[in-house]
Image: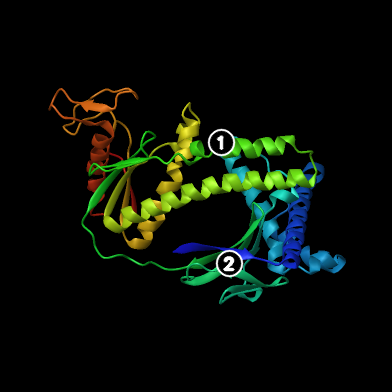
Amino acid sequence: MIKSFRYRIYPTKRQTETLNQQLAICCEIYNAALQERREAWKLEQKSIGLYDQINQLPAIRKDREDVARLYSHVLRDPLVRVDNAFKAFFRRLKSKNKPGYPRFKSARRYDSLVFTEHAAWSPQSGKVRIAKVGEVRVKQHRAIEGEPKTLTIKREAGRWFAIFVCDIGVSPLPFNSNTIGVDVGLSVFATLSNGTSIDNPRWLRNGEQALRIAQRKVKRRKKGSDRRHTAVLLLQRAYAKIRQQRSDFHHKLSRTLIDNNGLIAVEDLNIKGLASGRLSKSVNDAAWSNFIFMLSYKAENAGRLLVKVNPRGTSQTCLCGAEVRKTLKDRLHVCLSCGLVADRDHVSAQLILERGLCFQASTSPVAECVA
């Protein structure tokens, strides 16, 4: 199993300049590769592949000293990104989705360097050695597990991070016979089949005031000025704080559910469709897809069973099977057939668990229920 470990790093002023120069060169290579593919097809109807462009790198390194100072595998990564962008473009064309032709990148938006060989980097006690950069101080708040495969150096809101991608294998937890159904929502983030309600933190809503202040500062600064650049960094950090708070909440909740239950049942929702409706802001703030993704990979690593059930009718059906129609305003479930009166989300969570139990004997770490 592949897992990433992210650490804050503290490059010196000189190392920061070197990293920024490497990012600028990689961005230039990305844009040049994209331009070459566009012009080749436009003028000659010729398709250029990934390895055609990789084979040009040695000649470019001979002609340009600044490019030659970069590690060779770092220079290949922009070409791989361009190739992936075109593959995704043709895949969307084939599936008749909105294609979205690959676009050029601004140097300020190209923010990561990828090292794919151990010769280019090595983790040490309190430091990480990076080829062509040197030893950079790192805040290693936890040990790296498994075998590191790649290292990504990322610039985010003026801060730098090292992301180690490792193969950690599988670490199954002891058998647990507990089962739980999870009904995600907006009034509360989730309601469990045992009756527990998880409050919705609403990180974006609570951080809107800070975002408004940061956005006004950007708007009032002159474009291209140092003061505007500083204001942009403050805005980026305000968004980063919200993103990190949300991610921390999802990590802790998903870890608790995985540790305490052998089977977790959730709805297989069309979250992308819900995020484009009138409740889009609240749906995106809750970030259900990110939460379910965390449940999925943690269940796989722990040997737990995550079941995605068909969401059809989970909020309009009673445990006895009778249909109980409700609007979004109706928060109480009242069944005239069996007399059940309960919170609608609690009933939905119990129904989700019932549908998920049909896969309890499955050996797959992630299953889908079509009931």
**Most foreground residue, 117 or 261:** 261
Residue denoted by label 2: 150
The quadrant of the rendering that contains the C terminus is: top left
Label 1 neighbourhood size at 10 Å, few (<14), some (14-19), many (20+)?
few
Tally of numbered discs: 2
- Quadrant location, the N terminus: bottom left
Mark 1 element type: helix
Percent x, y of residue 19 = 72, 63
Look at label 2 and name its amino acid: Thr
Residue furthest toward the right?
63
Q: Position of residue 66 (x, y in %)?
A: 82, 65
**Which residue is denoted by mark 1 in the rendering?**
209
Q: Is label 2 or label 1 in front? A: 1
**Residue drawn at x 22%, y 44% as measured from the top left:** 194
Give the quarter of the image for residue 22: bottom right
- Residue nearer the viewer, 138 or 21: 138
